[in-house]
Amino acid sequence: MKDKIKYHSIRLFDKNGFHGTSMRDIGNAAGCKMPTLYYYYESKEILFDEVVRLAYIEMVDNLHKKFSSKLKPADFCIQSLLLKKSLTEDEKIIHRLAMKTWLGFEGCDDVRCKLLDWESLRNSRNMTLLSQEVSSEVWVRIITRTYTDLLQRIILFEENIPDSEIIQEMTLLFECAAKQKIKQEE
């Protein structure tokens, strides 16, 4: 029953939004009575946290395990974006809901704060990794923003960006950043 609740809740949250979805809606869609629903989840916020934030973090961790730790940052960014294009329907919904929550368009404040805290830790780590490859914090921000823009187009707008476009944009950014780094070192 818990899996049915999760299955229907993410679809309802995706379709109607957090505030437009009631626990009764979820119970009806999952075919369970309210006491059963509240047995598993004492509030809509707790349910949303589990099916969006926690599921998103688990999904991202599992996706990143597919990559070699020796992968260069440019290749990691490219492969990560290409992989996001082939997510399952559930993964796309979870990713979309997490992004909307992170952006403040959807969800509840508590889940957004937890997601922002988690993202902040990841961003610090990513900044450190990128700093080893590029010359300045400005390039790190440009690469991060381009990656985020491509990711939003893939996930939020369901745009089918050609692989070649993703590869070209990310490769060009890293090449320009690397050339500037070489000039600064001379």
Image (cartoon, grey):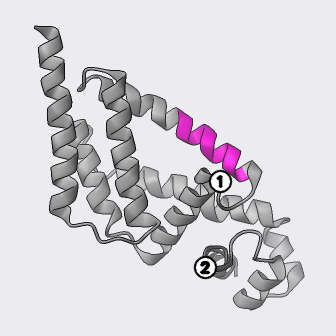
Location of residue 106 (image quadrant): bottom right
- Does residue 109 appear anywhere in the picture? yes
- Up-down relation of residue 118 to residue 37 (above or below): above
What is the number of the mark on residue 123? Answer: none
Instruction: Identify the residue shown where x is 16% and y is 44%.
Output: 171
Location of residue 179 (image quadrant): top left
What SS does tag 2 mark?
helix
Residue 24 rendering spot, x and y as whole percentages: 83, 83
The answer to whether residue 113 is magenta is yes
Per the image, the residue denoted by label 2 is 11
Per the image, the residue denoted by label 1 is 104
The residue sitting at the top extreme is: 186
Residue 63 rendering spot, x and y as whole percentages: 37, 55
Q: Which residues are magenta?
A: 111-120
Q: Which quadrant, please, contains the N terminus?
A: bottom right
Residue 82 rendering spot, x and y as whole percentages: 26, 60
